[in-house]
Image: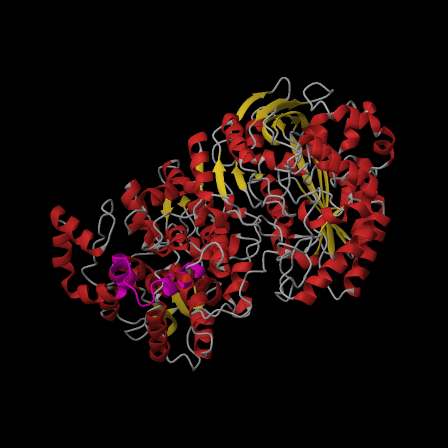
Amino acid sequence: MDIHELKQALGRAVRGDVEFGAGQRALFTMDASNYRRVPLGVVAPKDAADVAAALAVCRERHVPVVARGAGTSIAGQATGVGVVLDFTRHMDRIVALDPEAREAVVQPGVVLDRLRAEAGRHGLTFGPDPSTHSRCTLGGMIGNNSCGSHSVAWGTTADNVRSVDVLSYGGESFRLGQGWDGAPQQLKPLVEEQLALLRTGFPELPRRISGYALDALLPEQGVDHARAFCGSEGTLGVLTEATVELVEAPKARALTVLGYRDESAAAEAAAGLLPYGPLTVEGMAADLVRSPQQLPKGGAWLFVETGGASPREARAHGERIVRAADALDHLVVEDPAGQRALWRIREDASGTATRMPDGAEAWPGWEDCAVPPARLGPYLREFRALLAGHGLRGTPYGHFGDGCIHVRIDFDLLTEPGIARFRHFSEELAELVVAHGGSLSGEHGDGQARAELLPKMYGPELVRLFERVKGVWDPDDGLNPGMLVRPDPLDANLRFAPLPREPVPVAFGYPHDGGDFSAAVRRCVGVAKCRNTTVSSGSVMCPSFRATGAEEHSTRGRARLLHEMLAGEVITDGWRSEEVRDALDLCLSCKGCRSDCPVGVDMATYKSEFLHQHYRGRRRPRAHYTLGRLPKWLRLAAPFARVVNAAVSVRPLARLAGRLAGIAPEREIPRLAPRTFRRWFARRPQHTEPAVTLWPDTFTEHLSPAVGQAAVRVLEAAGLGVALPPKGVCCGLTYISTGQLDQARAILRRTLDTLDVGSPDRPLVVLEPSCAAALRSDLPELLGDDPRAHRLAASVRTFAEALAELAPDWTPPRLDRPAVGQTHCHQHAVLGDSADKELRRRAGLTGELSGGCCGLAGNFGFEPGHHEVSTACAEDQLLPAVREAAADAVVLADGYSCRTQLEQLAGRAGRHLAEVLAEGLPPERT
């Protein structure tokens, strides 16, 4: 194979993107499964003509082709060794939507939530809704015959597809619907020859996804080729367009959560609720719930959604189910925001399940078996016994009303004995599922994970028929070979095989991953919540992806590149990799993934680690020496603040200074405070005995001392005397964010020595959220062997936390004004903002702050080449919220970066909560 010639030929034939570089190939080596296959290249077609052209080029050279949507498949079917067709970049249009006919025509790259939003304007929706609804594509859903939580009401994707336009590997075009017209000619005689087998070979259950749905081609089933094509996993043809059915969305919904003793009790109750017509019956156990306080008492829960013409009717429907449920406890919620919060608990289980309670890794492979709903209770008990017999652990959850169970299991997929046990368990579990009349796959397809075991479910004769059907459609085996038909072994191509077996030397401690950077990178299993195109209230991840839409700028994409860097097969230059560096360059280090990613990927830390290793012994970007060492330069400049401010007020001098400092030309250089916060504090009389130590972070000290002054006033008004730490302390934030970790550790050790935190001390109040996050999380991870680091981290309090903890009876000034702004991303991800919300409530500051990231993110928005993305991040949530706010609204921004972004992009002055509260206090007596 001449790879260069293949790339050139595709470049001539295709108008879309043709990418064969190491970075793009690395991004597409994996989906959300246990498997990894390295493609030759990636093509993002513009339209169906591009798809046909790409297929022709590949066919002439006998190169296999894999169609791919969002890459959230869990059985390996979105990976391939040939050319990957990425439909998410260009072929993502809703071509037409007809509310009267209740149908939509979509391209394969359309994200489900986009279709649902458009349909929702007409009171309609698309029924199937996997937990990945915010990023999965219609093409992927059709390929896998996806289902989701509402399948008890609206069925699988196959139940909601009217026709599909398909291109075969051989270059033929088909429009598949009902009847034989438009289908391959050789298929009809093959089906008519096997009618008896088709009538007897398929188990009857709502979630039979395994194999080809050839029984849909029976005369009594209407010879439905569109239905038969669904779930074929890209092995028969490449979808280019689909006409899908829309259903009427209930005008109101209620969510009933039922508490049960354990998962078996919940499973046995689920089938009994189906006659009451629920929209969903979902189940999960306590092992997967981070915060059970929101849920009724119990060890397992059923989430049962009901609909109605009004909230009262939906609630009444839910209360009927409560009366029939015989649950330990229950909760009926009709408030949409409350329902969303509860559904997030269920949806995040797909990521939470990837870790055992003790932190051990857990993997898919048997993610979605399905049995008849009435058999679910007995099946679960036998499943648990099988797990225990193999010394394995896993927590089932999922679509109890359909008998479909998701589970991640703590397989050891790194050693030969562990992989052997994985195979042995898989074979025995397949037999157990079949014994209960079930399907090896109830939602995600067979792919490589289960296809090898299809003879246990269907028998050899029907599996041979699957092979013959594949031969009719794709005699050259050019489409997704190794999947579903003549599959690769279930224990081949495992994603972990090329990773190093010994931990690589790193600077951070990675305490949650046993100190192993490879294990930290393995956290990303491909759930792809970071690919959300819209951000829900209060969430952050992933601002750079929403700005660019490029996979390499998602948390998952960056994790894939780091995985391949460690593997060393595609990305071969390790820490020196330019592909990894370029992908991480647009990471804002917002830490949103640390909290919003269901598996806790912390890309900000990984970026810092990479920059540390990448530039070790090498010249760094200029901004690392200036912005990255900002505390040092500001200390030196402080005595000359007025002179510096005057100089940068002259535009030519400001441009020259910015160029020398490595600052983006679009940015204004902030002005220094003429008097530092420490100087102001030193001249202030001490009114009360110190109860807290107020951290004078670099930004408060040199750039916005008014924040510190306001905080002192408020803390003292609450009866909390304030002291400052000795000079010379620093959290090392700017050094950490630019990957200068040797200097950061030295600075942090000096800080520990200066503070003498070996003895009990006052709580440390930190006003700048990013500095508080650095002290609370980065400090103990960089100096984990120093007990003082952990004590200092534990002493850190935000401004609101200090007031809530140390002055709980203090009454803040009553402001009674609307508030607008954005929760600082580091506060959201590391510190939490519940104390801030309560303080705002008590002060009469109404309204919710938006999610997302301001986009400036410390040094990020000041660095050359980042201005466009920085601005796009601000326009995502923050700036629209501020523009739409009432005229008397308080613009809250606790972070210096957030305030600077507001000032430079919107001309609005944001204020720290301390400043707003201080304004409400009586005037100080002088």
Q: Is residue 700 above or below residue 54?
A: below
Colour scheme: secondary structure
Which residue is nearer to you in this view: 95 or 272? 95
Figure quadrant of the C terminus: bottom left
Q: Residue at x 58, y 40 (%)?
A: 64
Q: Is residue 514 left or right of residue 145?
A: left
**Magenta highlight range:** 605-631
Q: Residue at x 76, y 60 (%)?
A: 424
Q: Give the mark count.
A: 0
Residue 757 spot, x, y in % from top left: 41, 79
Q: Nearer the viewer, residue 867 or 189?
A: 189
Find residue 437 and report its image quarter.
Answer: top right
Most distant residue in the bottom direction:
759
Residue 849 to residue 790: above or below = above
Could you tell me residue 246's position as x and y percent? 64, 26
Q: Can I make out residue 534 in this image?
A: no
Q: Position of residue 266 (x, y in %)?
A: 78, 51
Q: Position of residue 290 (x, y in %)?
A: 62, 58
